[in-house]
Amino acid sequence: MSSERHVLLWLMLLTLLAATLYLLSGALLPFVAGMGVAYLLDPVADRLERLGLPRTAAALVIIFGFLLLVAMVMVVLVPVLSDQVAGLIARAPRYIDDLRSEVQPLLRRLRSNLTPSQAAQIDEAIKSHAGDVLGWVGQILSSIVYGGAAVLNLLGLLFVMPVVAFYMIRDWDRLVAHIDSLLPLHSADTIRHLAAEIDARLSGFVRGQAIVCLLLGAWYAIGLTIVGLDFALLLGIGAGVLTIIPYLGNIVGLTACLLLAMAQFDNWLSVLLVAAVFLSGQMLEGNFVSPKIVGDRVGLHPVWLMFAVTAGAVLLGITGALLAVPVAAAVGVLVRYGVQRYRNSALYADPRLTDPNVVEVLPPNPPPLAADAGNADGEAAAPKRPHADGDDRTSAAQQ
């Protein structure tokens, strides 16, 4: 099979896989979540197995410990967070009115320097773009919440996901070995190398960034509570969760908390303290936490991650948001591999400069000019033919 047919076959398989994921997105959430939990906790199972615990027992211990931890967090945090969500929804109109009263004097001052036509154009642009942004955000949220039957997904997460995670942890090594045995022999080494690089980048990012999210969420929640901001726990944990995409949690959390602080407080000192909480958290994350935990081996650009998560959420809801990070890591590795192959190919570099065995072929010598073929009088010169020894002997015999 030629290389073109190989590429066509892989493209057809990827297209079929993407179509299947899109059609079954409503039922995939517990399975994707279970595989994600198994991928994160497989190193723990390997360590317990090295300590002498059977693989099945290690999987049971890990799943029960994970469910116990999740239950404790839900019992402690869910009631508080639900109360804060209800309180924020109830107070939102008053906050909007207070914020409008704070901003209106500034807007009046700006309008005084504009002509009526310019002010009307600015108002129209703000209204149109605000409507587009709100519609886009609402589409994403509705696809996340309602895409693929949210109630069924919730029940699947509660009952199906632990079972899937248990079996995946128990059989993870056997599944990997079976898939490895099915790789095409002529390209198995290349596929193993790419898979190992994807695993290193993905595991380093997910496990490291999860720790970063926990630390920053705690930092934001504690700092905002000390400042006295309303709904500090909800906003701090939300900003920490969004930090799975670098810089996104800090930007979104800082913007929301500053708007709330401007509506809540009557002095600018408290607003500056809210900003200081996020700026200090960003400094700690960028200078100490991420370099020590995540490191520089991840190679996932924040803009690429933001696009992947947004596109996945729009296409497949929560399932797409969960699949976005591993897909982004895999695509990043494949793109870097393709760029490396391109730079080593003749399309990028001149083979005469890279291969010493390639000899440059020079063009033939040009024919003599017509003026050189004649004599000085312009008569045609007689052709000069060398006399061989045989010709000399023939002429001598004739004489």
Image (tube, rainbow, N blue to C red):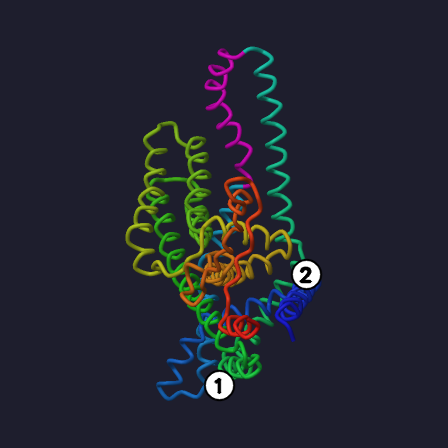
* Image mark for residue 118: none
Q: Quadrant of residue 319?
A: bottom right
Instruction: Find out whether the residues at labels 2 and 1 contact each other: C-beta distance under 8 Å.
Output: no
Nearest to the observer: residue 79 or residue 346: 346
Residue type at tag 2: Tyr
Q: Position of residue 314 (x, y in %)?
A: 62, 51
Q: In percent of the image, x 48 and y 16: which residue is there?
A: 110
Residue 116's place in the image compared with 396, above or below, is: above
Q: Position of residue 56 (x, y in %)?
A: 48, 85
Placement of the N terminus among the 4 image quadrants: bottom right
Q: In percent of the image, x 35 and y 27: which residue is there?
A: 267
Placement of the C terminus among the 4 image quadrants: bottom right
* Image mark for residue 22: 2
Q: Which residue is mark 1?
A: 56
Circle nearer the viewer, 2 or 1: 2
Residue type at tag 1: Thr
Main secondary structure found in the magenta portion = helix
Residue 243's place in the image compared with 118, above or below, is: below
Q: Is residue 75 visible?
A: no
Q: Position of residue 168 (x, y in %)?
A: 53, 77
Q: Quadrant of residue 49?
A: bottom left
Asked if residue 101 lies in the magenta stretch, the reply is yes
Q: Earlier in the sequence, mark 2 or mark 1?
A: 2
Q: Which residues are magenta?
A: 89-114
Real-space Cα separation, disc 2 to disc 1, in angstroms: 33 Å
Q: In percent of the image, x 65 and y 58: which residue is there?
A: 150
Asked if residue 356 lies in the magenta stretch, the reply is no
Nearest to the observer: residue 52 or residue 105: 52
Q: Of helix, strand and loop, which one carries label 1?
A: helix
In the picture, measured across the screen, residue 230 lies left or right of residue 25, that is left
| Crowd band around label 1 with a 10 angstrom C-alpha radius: few (<14), some (14–19), many (20+) | some
Q: Quadrant of residue 183?
A: bottom right
